[in-house]
Image (cartoon, rainbow, N blue to C red):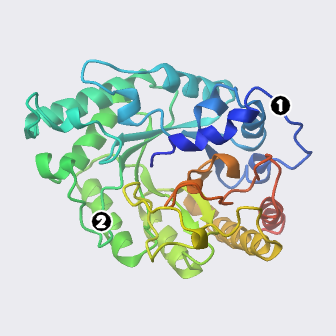
Amino acid sequence: MFSRFKSAFALVLLIGTTLELPAQTALKDVFGRDFLIGAALNPAQFNERDKTGAALVKRHFNSVSPENVMKWEVIHPAADRYNFAEADRYVEFGVANRMFVVGHTLVWHNQTPKWVFEDAPGKPVGRDELLKRMREHIMTVVGRYQGKIGGWDVVNEALDEDGNLRQSPWLKIIGEDYIAKAFEFAHEADPKAQLYYNDYSLENDAKRRGAVALVKKLRDRKIFVSGIGTQGHWNLEYPTRGQLEATLDAFAEFGKVSVTELDVDVLPRPGNYSGAEISQNFELQEKLDPYKNGLPADVQKQLANRYAELFKIFLEHRKQLARVTFWGVADNDSWKNNFPVRGRTNYPLLFDREWKPKPAFDAVIETAKNRE
């Protein structure tokens, strides 16, 4: 999903050292019979420069996603140039550790270079040429990792909040069938890979209905779509149990659902925006960064209770779920430290800034032990 390059810098001072991890039950063992448990990785982790983070990933997760290294601007920055070095290492890490490897993402309106949508003079490219570029990109990238990457986020965030198609360059130049074409090309490149539509705020009624209509239309055309991924950038109140359950039930019609980018924001939000558009950015304000010196015990408890509630719902719907992936490994490398306000101190994951399990981790484990 979004630009998280800055998150890796929090690790700089600790890269190359290994902290002793405390003994703890592995998440992948606790949920092994229910669904995959994944994490999004940055290069320091899959290159194992961040040795402690890499060890944490190996211990707890059986699925991995790439934060940025497979996004178009990184892997295909110029028309005549691909940059596979980091993507290759990411895939090698996942395969070597027998993980389900996810590719993220093929077609998106963000983090896609301008050259993709323009001709030489900088004018919008035509439909046929953009389809040609899309196909060449997908065939090259997906084809390279055929048999190694198990599933792809083929199209990312194609819907607006009202459930209608976003007015992206893809839509404006190609038309609404750009989504079908992307899935067709991806399936052609790797017929055995799982192919997902991925988006945020799908727990909202209008956007959920839009996603259902979108995938149903694709399925009616016999387009291969494995399922829908709901990102899961949530907070202490959103979504409600009813919203989340309605989403899982609605999407299960199209195959098992994936929660693809889970984190829980504990900080005040500037406004009511609950999505994850990187173009939305706000300057740091003291009132929006209240926990710079640590998370108060009462908020820590709220976070633990929230994660327990979410995983209780996941377990109740485990027959509908394929995977739950956290967007990051520990609080120090979370993109939420810089979104939607740069330079804040957030606490959205199960492991703290020293890679130690938080009360939220214990709450998730306890929820699994008490599963019905």
Nearest the camera: 257 or 44? 44
Image location of residue 111, percent across then percent down: 35, 42
Nearest the camera: 151 or 119? 119
In the image: residue 32, left or right of residue 22 = left
**Cα distance in 3D space between marks 2 and 1:** 43 Å
Residue 96: quadrant of the picture: top right
* Earlier sequence position, callout 2 versus callout 1: 1
Which residue is labeled 2 in the image? 160
In the image: residue 216, left or right of residue 270 = left
Residue at the spot x=74%, y=47% of the render? 28
In the image: residue 173, left or right of residue 78 = left
For residue 176, the mark is none
Nearest the camera: 261 or 209? 261
Compared to 48, does 368 lie above or below?
Answer: below
Three-letter amino acid code at the position of disc 1: Thr
Which residue is labeled 1 in the image? 18
- The quadrant of the picture occupied by the C terminus is bottom right
Pointer 1 local density, CA inside 10 Å: few below 14, some 14–19, many at least 20: some
